[in-house]
Amino acid sequence: MNEIEFPLVWDSTRLAALRACKRQFELGHLMSLKVKGTSVHLHAGAAFAHGLEVTRRAFYAQGATPADSVAQGIHALITSYGDFDHGTSAKSCERMVGALEYYFSEYPLESDPARIITLGGKPAIEFSFAIPLPITHPSTGEPLLYCGRFDAVVDYAGGVYAMDEKTTSSLGASWARQWDMRGQFAGYAWALKEHGVEAAGTIVAGVSILKTKYEQQRVVVPQPEWKIAEWYEDMLSDIQEAKAIYSSGARWKKNWSESCNSYGSCSYKQLCVVRDPAPWLETYYERNEWNPLKIIEAL
Amino acid sequence: MEDIRLKIDELRQKALAGTMTIEDCKEAVELCRLHRGKAAVRPPGSEATKRPPKGPSKGAPRNHTDRPSTENLLKGL
Protein backbone atom coordinates (compact mmCIF):
# COMPACT_ATOMS: atom_id res chain seq x y z
CA MET A 1 0.00 0.00 0.00
CA ASN A 2 1.31 3.49 -0.86
CA GLU A 3 2.16 5.92 1.93
CA ILE A 4 1.14 8.76 -0.37
CA GLU A 5 -2.59 9.46 -0.48
CA PHE A 6 -4.55 9.17 -3.70
CA PRO A 7 -6.31 12.48 -4.42
CA LEU A 8 -9.94 12.70 -3.38
CA VAL A 9 -10.48 15.92 -5.33
CA TRP A 10 -9.81 16.17 -9.05
CA ASP A 11 -9.80 19.12 -11.42
CA SER A 12 -8.60 20.01 -14.90
CA THR A 13 -5.08 20.81 -13.67
CA ARG A 14 -4.73 17.42 -12.00
CA LEU A 15 -6.15 15.60 -15.00
CA ALA A 16 -3.88 17.49 -17.40
CA ALA A 17 -0.82 16.51 -15.36
CA LEU A 18 -1.91 12.87 -15.33
CA ARG A 19 -2.39 12.87 -19.08
CA ALA A 20 0.83 14.75 -19.82
CA CYS A 21 3.05 12.42 -17.81
CA LYS A 22 2.35 9.89 -15.03
CA ARG A 23 5.60 10.78 -13.31
CA GLN A 24 4.70 14.50 -13.42
CA PHE A 25 1.37 13.61 -11.81
CA GLU A 26 3.10 11.58 -9.11
CA LEU A 27 5.59 14.33 -8.28
CA GLY A 28 3.16 17.24 -8.45
CA HIS A 29 -0.10 15.73 -7.23
CA LEU A 30 0.74 12.70 -5.10
CA MET A 31 3.94 14.03 -3.55
CA SER A 32 2.72 17.68 -3.83
CA LEU A 33 6.11 18.93 -4.97
CA LYS A 34 6.47 22.23 -6.71
CA VAL A 35 9.42 24.37 -7.72
CA LYS A 36 10.33 26.86 -5.00
CA GLY A 37 9.16 30.41 -5.54
CA THR A 38 6.03 31.92 -7.01
CA SER A 39 5.41 32.28 -10.71
CA VAL A 40 4.85 35.91 -11.71
CA HIS A 41 2.27 34.70 -14.23
CA LEU A 42 0.23 32.90 -11.57
CA HIS A 43 0.52 35.74 -9.06
CA ALA A 44 -0.34 38.47 -11.54
CA GLY A 45 -3.10 36.35 -13.07
CA ALA A 46 -4.65 35.74 -9.66
CA ALA A 47 -4.58 39.46 -8.82
CA PHE A 48 -6.19 40.26 -12.18
CA ALA A 49 -8.88 37.61 -11.63
CA HIS A 50 -9.66 39.04 -8.20
CA GLY A 51 -9.91 42.55 -9.67
CA LEU A 52 -12.22 41.23 -12.37
CA GLU A 53 -14.44 39.49 -9.82
CA VAL A 54 -14.73 42.53 -7.55
CA THR A 55 -15.48 44.79 -10.53
CA ARG A 56 -18.31 42.54 -11.68
CA ARG A 57 -19.77 42.05 -8.21
CA ALA A 58 -19.77 45.81 -7.64
CA PHE A 59 -21.66 46.37 -10.90
CA TYR A 60 -24.00 43.38 -11.06
CA ALA A 61 -24.65 42.68 -7.38
CA GLN A 62 -24.21 46.05 -5.68
CA GLY A 63 -25.47 48.32 -8.45
CA ALA A 64 -22.36 50.50 -8.47
CA THR A 65 -21.71 52.70 -11.49
CA PRO A 66 -19.29 51.33 -14.09
CA ALA A 67 -16.63 53.84 -13.05
CA ASP A 68 -16.97 53.01 -9.35
CA SER A 69 -17.01 49.29 -10.14
CA VAL A 70 -13.75 49.42 -12.09
CA ALA A 71 -12.17 51.52 -9.32
CA GLN A 72 -13.21 48.88 -6.77
CA GLY A 73 -11.69 46.23 -9.00
CA ILE A 74 -8.43 48.14 -9.26
CA HIS A 75 -8.42 48.48 -5.47
CA ALA A 76 -8.80 44.71 -5.12
CA LEU A 77 -6.14 44.02 -7.75
CA ILE A 78 -3.54 46.25 -6.11
CA THR A 79 -4.31 44.78 -2.69
CA SER A 80 -3.96 41.24 -4.06
CA TYR A 81 -0.74 42.00 -5.92
CA GLY A 82 0.74 43.28 -2.68
CA ASP A 83 4.49 43.82 -2.57
CA PHE A 84 5.30 40.99 -4.98
CA ASP A 85 8.46 41.59 -7.03
CA HIS A 86 7.68 41.02 -10.71
CA GLY A 87 11.35 41.02 -11.74
CA THR A 88 11.71 41.78 -15.44
CA SER A 89 8.28 40.45 -16.40
CA ALA A 90 5.80 42.71 -18.19
CA LYS A 91 3.21 41.67 -15.58
CA SER A 92 4.07 44.37 -13.08
CA CYS A 93 1.36 45.74 -10.82
CA GLU A 94 0.94 48.89 -12.89
CA ARG A 95 0.67 46.89 -16.13
CA MET A 96 -1.96 44.62 -14.56
CA VAL A 97 -3.90 47.69 -13.39
CA GLY A 98 -3.68 49.07 -16.91
CA ALA A 99 -4.85 45.71 -18.29
CA LEU A 100 -7.98 45.72 -16.11
CA GLU A 101 -8.81 49.30 -17.14
CA TYR A 102 -8.15 48.40 -20.79
CA TYR A 103 -10.36 45.29 -20.63
CA PHE A 104 -13.34 47.24 -19.31
CA SER A 105 -12.79 49.96 -21.89
CA GLU A 106 -12.96 47.30 -24.62
CA TYR A 107 -15.97 45.62 -22.96
CA PRO A 108 -17.74 48.27 -20.88
CA LEU A 109 -19.79 46.76 -18.06
CA GLU A 110 -22.97 48.45 -19.24
CA SER A 111 -22.70 47.29 -22.85
CA ASP A 112 -20.64 44.07 -22.96
CA PRO A 113 -22.54 41.74 -25.33
CA ALA A 114 -21.73 38.86 -22.95
CA ARG A 115 -24.19 39.59 -20.13
CA ILE A 116 -23.77 37.82 -16.81
CA ILE A 117 -26.88 35.77 -16.01
CA THR A 118 -28.56 35.21 -12.69
CA LEU A 119 -28.39 31.78 -11.08
CA GLY A 120 -30.00 30.97 -7.78
CA GLY A 121 -31.05 34.61 -7.52
CA LYS A 122 -27.48 35.88 -7.72
CA PRO A 123 -25.26 37.09 -10.59
CA ALA A 124 -23.30 34.10 -11.84
CA ILE A 125 -19.85 35.48 -11.05
CA GLU A 126 -17.08 33.04 -10.09
CA PHE A 127 -19.09 29.90 -10.66
CA SER A 128 -17.69 27.07 -8.52
CA PHE A 129 -18.56 23.41 -8.55
CA ALA A 130 -17.62 20.18 -6.78
CA ILE A 131 -19.43 17.19 -8.27
CA PRO A 132 -19.19 13.58 -7.08
CA LEU A 133 -17.97 11.04 -9.59
CA PRO A 134 -18.94 7.36 -9.88
CA ILE A 135 -15.43 6.36 -8.77
CA THR A 136 -14.57 5.66 -5.15
CA HIS A 137 -11.40 6.54 -3.31
CA PRO A 138 -9.13 3.46 -3.09
CA SER A 139 -8.56 3.92 0.64
CA THR A 140 -11.65 5.56 2.09
CA GLY A 141 -14.35 4.40 -0.34
CA GLU A 142 -15.74 7.95 -0.63
CA PRO A 143 -16.79 9.13 -4.10
CA LEU A 144 -14.11 11.21 -5.78
CA LEU A 145 -14.98 14.82 -6.60
CA TYR A 146 -14.45 16.81 -9.79
CA CYS A 147 -14.08 20.52 -9.01
CA GLY A 148 -13.57 23.75 -10.81
CA ARG A 149 -14.23 27.45 -10.92
CA PHE A 150 -14.61 29.87 -13.79
CA ASP A 151 -15.15 33.58 -14.06
CA ALA A 152 -18.77 33.94 -15.10
CA VAL A 153 -21.83 32.41 -16.74
CA VAL A 154 -22.99 34.68 -19.56
CA ASP A 155 -25.74 35.04 -22.10
CA TYR A 156 -24.22 35.73 -25.50
CA ALA A 157 -25.80 35.74 -28.94
CA GLY A 158 -28.74 33.68 -27.74
CA GLY A 159 -26.77 31.03 -25.90
CA VAL A 160 -25.44 30.49 -22.38
CA TYR A 161 -21.67 30.17 -22.00
CA ALA A 162 -19.10 29.62 -19.32
CA MET A 163 -16.72 32.56 -19.58
CA ASP A 164 -13.10 32.45 -18.51
CA GLU A 165 -10.59 35.28 -18.76
CA LYS A 166 -6.96 34.46 -19.27
CA THR A 167 -4.01 36.80 -19.06
CA THR A 168 -1.20 36.05 -21.45
CA SER A 169 1.92 37.50 -22.99
CA SER A 170 0.77 37.31 -26.57
CA LEU A 171 -2.33 36.66 -28.64
CA GLY A 172 -2.74 35.50 -32.20
CA ALA A 173 -4.18 32.73 -34.34
CA SER A 174 -2.33 30.02 -32.43
CA TRP A 175 -3.63 31.33 -29.13
CA ALA A 176 -7.19 31.03 -30.37
CA ARG A 177 -6.65 27.51 -31.76
CA GLN A 178 -5.41 25.97 -28.52
CA TRP A 179 -8.76 25.94 -26.75
CA ASP A 180 -10.99 23.73 -28.89
CA MET A 181 -9.74 20.50 -27.28
CA ARG A 182 -9.12 21.91 -23.82
CA GLY A 183 -10.69 19.54 -21.35
CA GLN A 184 -10.97 22.30 -18.76
CA PHE A 185 -13.69 23.93 -20.85
CA ALA A 186 -15.60 20.78 -21.70
CA GLY A 187 -15.61 20.26 -17.94
CA TYR A 188 -17.18 23.67 -17.39
CA ALA A 189 -19.99 22.88 -19.80
CA TRP A 190 -20.51 19.51 -18.09
CA ALA A 191 -20.61 21.17 -14.68
CA LEU A 192 -23.21 23.69 -15.83
CA LYS A 193 -25.31 20.85 -17.24
CA GLU A 194 -25.06 19.04 -13.88
CA HIS A 195 -26.46 22.22 -12.32
CA GLY A 196 -29.36 22.31 -14.76
CA VAL A 197 -27.91 24.91 -17.12
CA GLU A 198 -27.65 23.97 -20.79
CA ALA A 199 -24.47 25.70 -21.92
CA ALA A 200 -23.67 26.11 -25.60
CA GLY A 201 -19.96 26.27 -24.82
CA THR A 202 -17.22 28.42 -23.41
CA ILE A 203 -16.02 31.91 -24.16
CA VAL A 204 -12.29 32.26 -23.59
CA ALA A 205 -11.34 35.91 -23.16
CA GLY A 206 -7.65 36.57 -23.59
CA VAL A 207 -5.91 39.73 -22.39
CA SER A 208 -2.38 40.16 -23.55
CA ILE A 209 -0.06 42.20 -21.37
CA LEU A 210 3.14 43.44 -22.94
CA LYS A 211 5.46 46.17 -21.69
CA THR A 212 4.02 48.86 -23.93
CA LYS A 213 0.64 47.65 -25.17
CA TYR A 214 -2.44 45.56 -24.47
CA GLU A 215 -4.52 43.40 -26.74
CA GLN A 216 -7.60 41.30 -26.25
CA GLN A 217 -9.33 38.46 -28.04
CA ARG A 218 -12.44 36.43 -27.32
CA VAL A 219 -12.92 32.93 -28.69
CA VAL A 220 -16.16 30.99 -28.60
CA VAL A 221 -15.56 27.26 -28.10
CA PRO A 222 -18.70 25.20 -28.72
CA GLN A 223 -19.27 22.26 -26.38
CA PRO A 224 -21.90 20.04 -28.03
CA GLU A 225 -23.45 17.14 -26.18
CA TRP A 226 -21.32 14.47 -27.86
CA LYS A 227 -18.09 16.28 -26.95
CA ILE A 228 -19.07 16.65 -23.31
CA ALA A 229 -20.01 12.95 -23.20
CA GLU A 230 -16.64 11.92 -24.67
CA TRP A 231 -14.78 14.19 -22.29
CA TYR A 232 -16.66 12.71 -19.32
CA GLU A 233 -16.04 9.12 -20.43
CA ASP A 234 -12.34 9.81 -20.97
CA MET A 235 -12.06 11.58 -17.61
CA LEU A 236 -13.53 8.59 -15.75
CA SER A 237 -11.29 6.21 -17.70
CA ASP A 238 -8.13 8.19 -16.94
CA ILE A 239 -8.93 8.49 -13.25
CA GLN A 240 -9.70 4.76 -13.08
CA GLU A 241 -6.32 4.09 -14.67
CA ALA A 242 -4.61 6.30 -12.09
CA LYS A 243 -6.46 4.47 -9.32
CA ALA A 244 -5.28 1.12 -10.70
CA ILE A 245 -1.65 2.27 -10.88
CA TYR A 246 -1.87 3.64 -7.33
CA SER A 247 -3.48 0.50 -5.95
CA SER A 248 -0.97 -1.81 -7.64
CA GLY A 249 2.05 0.15 -6.41
CA ALA A 250 3.44 0.19 -9.97
CA ARG A 251 5.92 2.86 -11.01
CA TRP A 252 4.41 6.03 -12.46
CA LYS A 253 5.86 6.10 -15.96
CA LYS A 254 7.61 9.05 -17.60
CA ASN A 255 6.33 10.59 -20.82
CA TRP A 256 9.68 10.39 -22.65
CA SER A 257 8.31 12.77 -25.23
CA GLU A 258 6.97 16.27 -25.83
CA SER A 259 5.61 16.79 -22.31
CA CYS A 260 9.20 16.91 -21.07
CA ASN A 261 9.84 20.02 -23.14
CA SER A 262 6.48 21.77 -23.19
CA TYR A 263 6.40 25.40 -22.01
CA GLY A 264 10.19 25.43 -22.20
CA SER A 265 10.70 22.42 -19.97
CA CYS A 266 8.71 20.34 -17.50
CA SER A 267 9.38 21.72 -14.05
CA TYR A 268 10.33 18.24 -12.85
CA LYS A 269 12.65 17.39 -15.71
CA GLN A 270 15.81 17.77 -13.64
CA LEU A 271 14.48 15.03 -11.34
CA CYS A 272 13.99 12.67 -14.27
CA VAL A 273 17.40 13.07 -15.89
CA VAL A 274 19.35 11.91 -12.80
CA ARG A 275 19.51 8.47 -11.26
CA ASP A 276 19.03 9.82 -7.74
CA PRO A 277 16.75 12.90 -7.60
CA ALA A 278 16.93 13.24 -3.79
CA PRO A 279 19.68 15.92 -3.69
CA TRP A 280 17.70 18.07 -6.14
CA LEU A 281 14.47 17.85 -4.18
CA GLU A 282 15.62 19.76 -1.14
CA THR A 283 17.37 22.48 -3.12
CA TYR A 284 14.79 23.23 -5.76
CA TYR A 285 11.41 21.96 -4.57
CA GLU A 286 8.97 22.41 -1.71
CA ARG A 287 5.78 20.69 -0.60
CA ASN A 288 2.72 22.62 -1.67
CA GLU A 289 -0.49 20.66 -1.85
CA TRP A 290 -2.70 21.35 -4.86
CA ASN A 291 -6.19 21.21 -3.39
CA PRO A 292 -8.91 22.44 -5.76
CA LEU A 293 -11.46 22.41 -2.93
CA LYS A 294 -9.43 24.89 -0.87
CA ILE A 295 -9.47 27.35 -3.76
CA ILE A 296 -13.27 27.10 -3.89
CA GLU A 297 -13.66 27.35 -0.11
CA ALA A 298 -11.52 30.49 -0.10
CA LEU A 299 -14.23 32.37 -1.99
CA MET B 1 4.27 55.43 -18.38
CA GLU B 2 6.50 56.65 -15.61
CA ASP B 3 3.65 58.66 -14.12
CA ILE B 4 1.45 55.54 -13.96
CA ARG B 5 4.24 53.50 -12.41
CA LEU B 6 4.80 56.15 -9.75
CA LYS B 7 1.09 56.41 -9.04
CA ILE B 8 0.68 52.64 -8.68
CA ASP B 9 3.80 52.39 -6.52
CA GLU B 10 2.22 55.04 -4.29
CA LEU B 11 -1.05 53.07 -4.16
CA ARG B 12 0.76 49.82 -3.37
CA GLN B 13 2.34 51.49 -0.36
CA LYS B 14 -1.06 52.82 0.68
CA ALA B 15 -2.57 49.35 0.22
CA LEU B 16 0.06 47.81 2.48
CA ALA B 17 -0.65 50.52 5.05
CA GLY B 18 -4.41 49.97 4.68
CA THR B 19 -5.03 53.58 3.56
CA MET B 20 -5.74 53.17 -0.17
CA THR B 21 -9.16 54.56 -1.10
CA ILE B 22 -11.51 54.03 -4.02
CA GLU B 23 -10.93 57.67 -5.01
CA ASP B 24 -7.21 56.91 -5.24
CA CYS B 25 -8.05 54.08 -7.63
CA LYS B 26 -10.31 56.31 -9.73
CA GLU B 27 -7.34 58.60 -10.30
CA ALA B 28 -5.28 55.60 -11.35
CA VAL B 29 -7.99 54.51 -13.80
CA GLU B 30 -8.04 58.00 -15.32
CA LEU B 31 -4.25 58.00 -15.69
CA CYS B 32 -4.37 54.65 -17.46
CA ARG B 33 -7.11 55.91 -19.79
CA LEU B 34 -5.19 59.09 -20.62
CA HIS B 35 -2.04 57.11 -21.31
CA ARG B 36 -3.88 54.74 -23.65
CA GLY B 37 -5.34 57.74 -25.46
CA LYS B 38 -1.84 59.16 -26.01
CA ALA B 39 -0.53 55.78 -27.17
CA ALA B 40 -3.35 55.53 -29.72
CA VAL B 41 -2.37 58.79 -31.45
CA ARG B 42 1.34 58.09 -31.82
CA PRO B 43 2.72 59.04 -35.26
CA PRO B 44 2.84 56.41 -38.07
CA GLY B 45 5.82 54.07 -37.97
CA SER B 46 5.65 53.64 -34.21
CA GLU B 47 4.96 50.28 -32.56
CA ALA B 48 1.29 51.22 -32.33
CA THR B 49 1.04 50.04 -35.96
CA LYS B 50 -0.45 46.58 -36.03
CA ARG B 51 1.80 43.85 -37.43
CA PRO B 52 0.29 40.90 -39.30
CA PRO B 53 0.25 37.64 -37.31
CA LYS B 54 3.46 35.59 -37.66
CA GLY B 55 3.38 32.31 -39.52
CA PRO B 56 5.50 29.30 -38.41
CA SER B 57 9.24 29.92 -38.90
CA LYS B 58 11.38 27.45 -40.85
CA GLY B 59 13.00 24.88 -38.62
CA ALA B 60 10.94 25.87 -35.59
CA PRO B 61 9.09 23.11 -33.75
CA ARG B 62 5.67 22.64 -35.33
CA ASN B 63 2.64 23.38 -33.25
CA HIS B 64 0.34 20.37 -33.08
CA THR B 65 -2.37 22.41 -34.75
CA ASP B 66 -0.20 22.67 -37.89
CA ARG B 67 -0.20 18.90 -38.36
CA PRO B 68 -2.50 17.51 -41.07
CA SER B 69 -5.29 15.41 -39.66
CA THR B 70 -5.05 11.62 -39.77
CA GLU B 71 -8.11 11.52 -42.05
CA ASN B 72 -6.43 13.80 -44.59
CA LEU B 73 -3.24 11.75 -44.45
CA LEU B 74 -5.19 8.56 -45.18
CA LYS B 75 -7.04 10.24 -48.07
CA GLY B 76 -3.71 10.80 -49.80
CA LEU B 77 -2.86 7.07 -49.85
Image (spheres, rainbow, N blue to C red):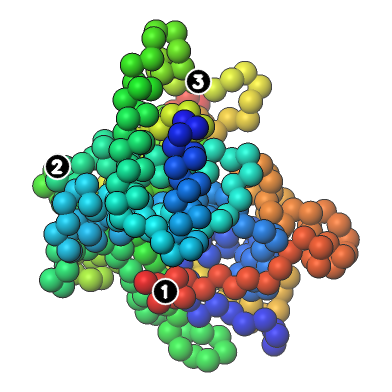
Dot 3: chain letter: B
Q: Is residue B50 above or below residue A201?
A: above
Q: Give how far apart the Cα atoms at labels 1 and 3 are.
A: 42 Å
- Image quadrant of residue A249? bottom right
Percent x, y of residue A70: 27, 49
**Residue under numbered circle 3:** B55
Q: Is residue B12 visible?
A: yes
Residue reaching furthest bottom?
A: A140
**Residue under numbered circle 2:** A111
Q: Is residue A98 above or below residue B47?
A: below
- Image quadrant of residue A192? bottom left
The type of residue carrying mark 1 is Ala
Residue at x 45%, y 13% (from the top left corner)? B46
Verify CB contact (< 8 Å) between mark 2 and mark 3: no
**Front residue of A63 and A21:** A63
Percent x, y of residue A208: 43, 37
Percent x, y of residue B30: 30, 38
Q: Which mark is residue A298?
A: 1
- Of labels 2 and 1, earlier in sequence is 2
Whether residue A162 sits left or right of residue A264 in the image: it is left
The type of residue carrying mark 2 is Ser
Residue reaching furthest top?
A: B44
Q: Is residue B21 above or below residue A211?
A: below
Residue at x 29%, y 51% (from the top left corner)? B23
Residue at x 35%, y 22% (from the top left corner)? B38
Dot 1: chain letter: A
Dot 2: chain letter: A
Secondary element under disc 2, as helix, strand or loop, is: loop
